[in-house]
Image (cartoon, rainbow, N blue to C red):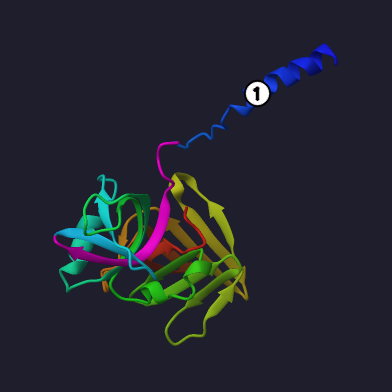
Amino acid sequence: MSPARALIFALLPLFAGCQVFVPGENAGEPPRQRLQGELNLLNGQLQLRPCGEQRQFRLLNDGSSEIVREAGELLKDGPGPLFVDLSGHLSAGKTADNDGELQVSEVYRIQREGLGCDDPAFKRLVLRASGNEPDWSMNITSQGLVLYRPGQEPLALPYLEEQLPDGRFAISSEANGQRLDLWVAPQRCSNSMSGAVQHLSAELRLDGQVLRGCAAFGGARNR
């Protein structure tokens, strides 16, 4: 055996004992999970029951999210549950009245009205945006976008996405003689009519008309 090959075989046990380090990962921290479900206030604590489950998790907040205040505002209008879409780190429960704890890191959406857990389109959605006065809504998937407006046929179009500084991005389409631009920014946004809170603000520009609203990522996109 050549000296070079002998050296390689001698080092194999050392390589076998090494672990691959992935930048940005903390081996002692559980992976972040995104969950949708019903939010209730029980004994002064916010409790999340994920869609389709019986388990309940107590929500913890390190101050990076305003979910306690925002949920409290919606719960003032009546009892729960609220629908929430959020992400965070799960850990074992410390009390007998829950199945674990969720340290919240991102809140995508809090709402009282809507389909919630029964939304069949959620998993396919990249983004959903909507606004009032006048009413409009837009569903965006990897296949294209559909714009809905009262009294008009749904407008289905292909689109291009442009990433902008500071986490902003733009969705644009020019087809069938119409120009559409949707500008999205990472800014907490509240629907003035329903009180729903979303993590993105949206501005729709359609043939010179400017319509404002809120937006949130669907199940097909986290960031």
| Left or right position of 150 against 197 | right
| 130 lies above or below 13 | below
The residue sitting at 75% across, 15% down in the picture is 7
User: Which quarter of the rendered picture does the N terminus lie within?
Assistant: top right
Extreme bottom residue here? 151
Structural crowding at the residue carrying mark 1, measured as other residues with C-alpha within 10 Å and reported as few (<14), some (14–19) or many (≥20): few
Extreme top residue here? 3
Q: Nearer the viewer, residue 21 or 96?
A: 96
- Span of residues in magenta: 27-43
* Residue at the disc numbered 1: 13
- Asked which quadrant contains residue 59, the reply is bottom left
**Amino acid type, callout 1:** Pro
| Left or right position of 132 against 174 | left
The residue sitting at 85% across, 14% down in the picture is 2
The residue sitting at 37% across, 68% down in the picture is 53
Q: Nearer the viewer, residue 179 or 112?
A: 112
